[in-house]
Image (spheres, rainbow, N blue to C red):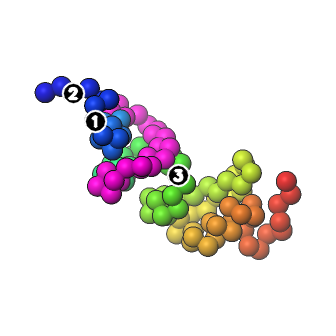
Amino acid sequence: MRVAAATLSGGNQQKVIIAREFTRNGRLLVAAQPTRGVDVGSTEFIHRKLVEARDGGMAVLLVSAELDEVLSLADRIAVMYRGKIAGVLDASEATPELLGYMMATGNRPSEPAATA
C-alpha cells in the first residue's frame, strides 16, 4: 500500500525522512532538531537510528536545543556563544551545569570572560 507522506502524522513524517536518509549510505548525517515536536516513541526510534548510524561508521552531526538529547547521544559537544564556537569538550566531561555556564558566558569557568 502506498500512502502520501503528507497524510502521515508529524512523527511518522520524520520517521520517513530519517529512513530515507539512512538508506542513502552517506558518510555524514546532519540531524537538526531531529526530535522536536514528536512523541516519546518517535523520539526513541530517532535516537536509536542515530546511534546505529554512528556505530555503523557514519559521522553524525547533531544540532539540538535539547540538552538531555545532546548529553545522551553526543561523543563530543561544541558549545555555541553569540554565533561562535566557545569550546569543544568530550561528552564524558560535560555536565548540564558546565554546558549552561559555557552557553551563558562563552567560556569555561576558569577562563576569563569573553568579549563581544
Name the residue type under label 3: Ser
Q: Is residue 37 magenta?
A: yes
Q: CA distance from mark 1 to mark 3?
A: 24 Å
Tag 3 or tag 1, which sits nearer the N-term?
Answer: 1
Give the residue drawn at x 52%, y 69%: 92
Q: CA distance from mark 3 to mark 2?
A: 30 Å
* Quadrant hosting residue 26: top left
Q: Report whether 36 appears left or right of 48.
A: right
Q: CA distance from mark 2 to mark 1?
A: 8 Å
Which part of the image, by quadrant, shows the C terminus? bottom right
Query: Outermost residue toward the left?
Result: 1
Image disc number at residue 8: 1
Can you tell which of label 1 and label 3 is closer to the viewer?
A: 1
Asked whether disc 1 touches disc 3, contact meaning CB atoms under 8 Å apart, the reply is: no
Number of residues whose C-alpha sits closer than 10 Å to that of mark 2, classed few (under 14), some (14–19) or many (20 or more): few
Which part of the image, by quadrant, shows the N terminus? top left
Tag 2 or tag 3, which sits nearer the N-term?
Answer: 2
Image disc number at residue 59: none
Give the residue drawn at x 72%, y 47%: 83
Number of residues whose C-alpha sits closer than 10 Å to that of mark 3, classed few (under 14), some (14–19) or many (20 or more): some
| Label 1 element class | loop
Q: Circle 2 sits on which residue? A: 3
Can you tell which of label 3 and label 2 is closer to the viewer?
A: 2
Name the residue type under label 1: Leu
Q: Circle 3 sits on which residue? A: 64
* Quadrant hosting residue 44: bottom left
Magenta range is: 20-43
Front residue of this view, candidates 7 and 75: 7
Residue 84, how many percent across, how many down?
A: 72, 49
Number of residues whose C-alpha sits closer than 10 Å to that of mark 1, classed few (under 14), some (14–19) or many (20 or more): few
Query: Outermost residue toward the right?
Result: 115
Residue 91 visible in the picture: yes
